[in-house]
Amino acid sequence: MKKKLRIFLFPILLLAAWITFDLTVPVKRDISSINGKEIGEMEAKMWEAYYSKKKVDLLFNTAKIMRKQFKIPYWRSYLAAYYAAEAAFIFKNGTNREEYQLAYTSLEKYFQLINNISIQQFDVAEATQLELEWWIIRRYRDEHPPIEWEKWLARVASTVHGLPAKAFEEYAHLRVEAMLYRDRKGRSMTGEDWEYIRKLLHRAWGSLEQTISEPKTMAES
């Protein structure tokens, strides 16, 4: 009986040890090297899950992006994904600026987790507020046209990667173009529409990949 119990408990204890190690041991990652096409594909799937209100799919796809984009350890990627998803759904249920701001805490935890593992440190509070602000101005599009979205989106990337916002203009423009296309289609989105968005997101993240890798390439040459 005791032998069977030990056999049963061993994998559970091993899993618990792995999770604890993964979540607590300090690690540092270089977030200036990504595969833009892979991340673009994953983001398209994440959008589909979000707009279909498939919370589990959203969590899994976001965790994949965390591991690919920021090299976050496996279990920690799910924690980051949880914070991101929590912020997104809190925001989605909001109806005014005060309610939208309720997403700040979860979004801040998300950026803090990324900053904790990144070699390239950034201002977490600034990144959080910039990210939340461009979420908010999308809800007030009559007052804030898409060109403003692009500027805020470029500023988020600038803060996280420590490069001028101007360097991320193409990335921001393509992502906003994908957002606008999805918004225009609304509930009438088809498989072909999602394929078009995938292509835009491939190009957007490909642009970001090139932008953030160029300083590193120049330094190594």
Image: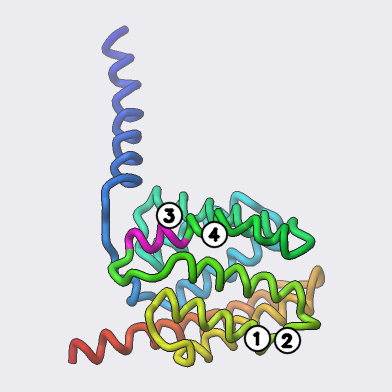
Overall secondary structure of the magenta stretch?
Answer: helix
Magenta-span inclusion, residue 114 = yes
Left or right relative to 116: residue 94: right
Label placed on residue 145: 2
In front of the other: 20 or 56: 20
Q: Earlier in the sequence, mark 3 or mark 1?
A: 3
Q: CA distance from mark 2 to mark 3?
A: 33 Å
Asked whether the residues under the numbered discs 2 and 1 touch, taking CB atoms below 8 Å apart as contact, a structural biologist would say: yes
Q: As displayed, is residue 179 above or below residue 90? A: below
The residue beneath circle 3 is 77
Query: Which residue corresponds to the image point at 32% horizontal and 65% vertical from the top-left?
Result: 118
Secondary structure found at label 2: loop
Q: Residues within 10 Å of mark 4 (few under 14, many from 20)?
A: many
* Residue type at tag 4: Leu
Magenta segment: 111-117
Q: Position of residue 117 (x, y in %)?
A: 32, 60
Q: Earlier in the sequence, mark 3 or mark 4?
A: 3
Query: Which residue corresponds to the image point at 70% horizontal and 55% vertical from the top-left?
Result: 53
Left or right relative to 22: residue 68: right
Q: Residues within 10 Å of mark 1 (few under 14, many from 20)?
A: some
Secondary structure found at label 3: helix
Left or right relative to 144: residue 111: left
Q: Earlier in the sequence, mark 2 or mark 3?
A: 3
* Residue type at tag 2: Pro
The residue beneath circle 1 is 148
Asked whether the residues under the numbered discs 2 and 4 touch, taking CB atoms below 8 Å apart as contact, a structural biologist would say: no
Q: CA distance from mark 3 to mark 4?
A: 14 Å
Which quadrant does the C terminus fall into?
Answer: bottom left
